[in-house]
Structures are given as structure tokens and as C-alpha cells.
Image (spheres, rainbow, N blue to C red):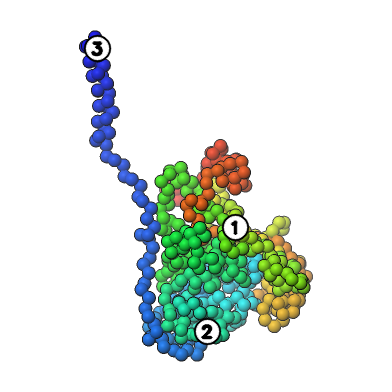
Amino acid sequence: MNARKHSWIGILFLVGAAIALPLLFMTPGEKPKADNPWEKIPPHRPQTNHAALLPGPFEDGPAVTRACLECHEDAAFEVMATAHWTWEGEPVRVDGHPGTYKLGKKNLINNFCISVQSNWPGCTSCHAGYGWKDENFDFSNTELVDCLVCHDHSGTYAKSKGGLPAEGVDLAAAAQSVGGPTRETCGGCHFKGGGGDAVKHGDLDTSLMNPPERVDVHMGKVGLVCVDCHWTEKHEMKGRSISVSVDDRNQVSCSDCHLPKPHEDERINLHADAVACQTCHIPEVALRERTKVHWDWSKAGEDRENADPHEYLKIKGEFIMQANLEPEYTWFDGTASRYLMGDKIAESGPTVLNQPHGDIGDPSSKIWPFKVHRGKQVYDEVYKTLLVPQTVGEGGYWDKFDWDQALRMGSSKTGLAYSGDYGFIETEMFWPLTHMVAPKESALQCTQCHSEDGILDWKALGYEGDPIDWGGRKVRQSAAAVEGR
């Protein structure tokens, strides 16, 4: 009996040793590298006191620029090579068009204020230069570069029509205060695009000047400024939007600072191949200020007593504004198609001005959040093309409220054919959302997507149904992968 007992003890000992000994000699696997975005944030340069260097007085903006260029000799030439100056990008190919095009705010149509062309004085108050009032602006004149619009720290600098300094601005005080770009300087233009605070983007508005953490975790909790993400070299800033471009060159990405799969929970990391970071981490935008989601130009010109200016303006028409806007979702590979001046409108349904590229089978596409702005804007009923009215200035629509006259004036500047017969059609414009990142506790949770009433329309995205039940997507092999086989 004792022998049998000792035999079993020996067997158990040997089995235990067989399991334990290999574990003792195994090399522990490396832990995943911790996500440390602070390693990537560029250092901020110390601010130089310019009070003695720029005593003033300065008679106008170009006088300030001349003084700046005495030390920063190459700065103006660097600025003049950027889209902030040219309002157009490098040549790119556009779907459905031969050759290449330099696209930008300078020459594209949108469904907000419609176009810069013929309306220069009103639009160029946000140009990084002085005096762009018509098609004859001299883009080669270094003295017309506006240094203060990006570098003022006085908080008093402002621009007016044509990009000239606003009346009463103390140019000497602004010049003596200069430093690196701040949220205030960037936001002076980007927070108020489309004619007012929060109008265009939905995720950019004046609440980001000094936001709480719940509005934007990067700016509110850790104090980042715009150029911490929009890295800058020789005045060229990273970042672009498909509102004015079709490619993703020099784009800002979360992975510029964060690991591509930064979560401790591998189940969440598995989503990263098909879902953009922004989709989960930006569940809503327009958190403090309402954003415009519809603009109907066909209602302009009416005299409406006591109308709420956020809902109706005689010069612009009828609006729908929305707070706490939930995004719309579609596949996106970072590029887009683009409506160009002179293109035909859609034969049915709304004309989409910048359709995002991407689909469920494309390995470079991810599900992205967008604000979709819907509008009703003027077009030529004979030529079936969108038209550009001249709105600003003498004789423009905001002066005479005469559509026919405004369209003739606009066409004389754009070169678009105008038959004399006009109407209004529905258009759509996509705005990718990437600001107003919520604290991680407020990110989308599993059941907000994976449930009967989840926010994602799986079938519209190309799935048979919820991937939990039907499985994930099947992607095509990329050309690079095929060539490498």
C-alpha cells in the first residue's frame, strides 16, 4: 500500500516538474510599449521680447512686415510657399477630370458662402496677407505677408475686408507682443469660418479657446495648442481637410503621437484596423456652440420681422443650427472626389461636393465620423452647373437682392456660363471630425454600436449585419501586397 502511495506521489511530482520547469526557464515576453505621446510633442520655443526690437509706430501692416523681415529674412518667402498664402495646394488628380489641378479655397465651390471668386473682400479677411480685394492681388510681394495674424499675442489684433488690419488696431502693441501661434490666433479664422462661430466645422469653435476637459481632452486637460499636432516646418503646417483638398499628403494623424494600437484591452485594439480613433473618441461635436447643418439660399431676400439671426438672415437665407451633433459615419481612406467649377450637377438626388473615398473592402479605409452639411444653392437650369453669385460689394446680392444681377456679376469673374435661368438644388458637403476629443470615460461604449438600436447602420456600411454576429470585413489585397508575393 505504501509503495503504491509513493508511486502516485512520484508520478505527481514528475508531472508537476514537467509543467513547472519549462516555465522557470522561459524568457518573459516583452510587454507592449507604453503609449507616451509626450515624446512626440515638439518643444515650444521661448518667446523673445520684441518691445525694443519693434518700437514702432507703424503706418500700416506692410510696415510691420518690413520690420520683421530685417531679422527673419526668409520668413515671407516660406509663408508664400504655403496654402495659407496661396489658398491652393500642389497639383493633384481629380476623379473624372483629365490632368492635374491646384485645388484650394481660392477656386472651389462650397455650400456655405459658395465661393471666394468675385467675393474676395469678404472672404480674404482671413487671408494671411494684406489687400487681397480682387483677382489682381500680387502674390509675389513679400511686404503683403501678414505676420501678425499668426503671431500676435496682444489679443487685440483683428483683420477687416481684404485682409487689412481693422480700424483702430495698435500695430506697435501687436508687433511687440509676437510669439508662436496660439489657439486664439489660429481660431481667429478657423473657429469662425462660414460667417460665424462654429458654423462650418462643428468641431472647431471659440469654446476651444479655453475648453474644459469634457469639450476637448487635448486642449482642456493637457493644455495642447494647435501647433502641437499641426507640426510646422518653414511655416508649412501639417493638416488638410477634404473641404479644400482631395488627397491626404502632409496630414495629421493620431498615430503621430499615439501608438497605432494603444489600448490595454486587445479587443479594443482589434477595432483599429477598421475604425478610426475619432469614431469612438468623438461621440458628439458642437458641445458648447451650435453648428450649421443646413443652409437654404433660396429663402434669402425675404423681409422677416423679428427673425432669429441663427435661423434666418435676409442676405443669406434660412438655416438649421444644431448643438451636441452626433456624427454620420462612412468609410474613408483619407481622399475624396471633388466638384469643380463647371461640373454638371447630379442627375438625381443631392450633388455631393466632396464625396469621401473608401469602402468596406479597402484595407486603407476606416469608418470615420463626419459632419454632413446640407445646403440648397443656386444653379443654372440650362447648363446644369452650380453658379457663383457676387454677394459682397456694390451691385452684389447683399446690396440689391437681385439674383440675376448677382449671378451675371459672379459669372463675369469666374468665367462660368450663365444662361439667365437659375434655380436652387440640394447639395451635400462632408467635414471630417477630429477635434473635440472626449475624455476616455466618455468614448463610445460597446453597446452603443453593437446593439439593436446602435448608432452604426451596418448594412449601409457594407456588412451583412452586426460584425459580432456576422463576422468582420474581408479586405482586398493592396497592390503592394500583391506585388510582394
Residue located beneath label 3 in the image: 4
Q: Nearer the viewer, residue 235 or 164?
A: 164
Asked if 468 appears above or below 398 in the picture, the reply is above
Q: Label 1 amino acid? A: Asn
In the picture, the disc for residue 169 is 2
Q: Label 3 amino acid? A: Arg
- Which residue sits at x=54%, y=39%? 468
Residues marked 1 and 3 touching at CB (< 8 Å): no
Q: Quadrant of residue 381?
A: bottom right
Q: Is residue 205 visible?
A: yes
Q: Position of residue 347 (x, y in %)?
A: 72, 58
Q: Position of residue 51 (x, y in %)?
A: 39, 84
Which element is circle 1 on? loop
Residues marked 2 and 1 touching at CB (< 8 Å): no
Q: Nearer the viewer, residue 157 or 237?
A: 157
Q: Tell me: 318 left or right of 169.
A: right
- Which residue sits at x=46%, y=84%? 173
Q: How dense is the environment of label 1, judged by Cα within 10 Å: few (below 14), some, or many (20 and up)?
A: some
Residue located beneath label 1 in the image: 324
Q: Nearer the viewer, residue 49 or 420?
A: 49
Q: Label 2 amino acid? A: Val
Which element is circle 2 on? loop
Residue at the limit of the structure toward the top, as seen here: 1
Q: Tell me: 419 left or right of 38.
A: right
Q: Position of residue 177 (x, y in %)?
A: 43, 80
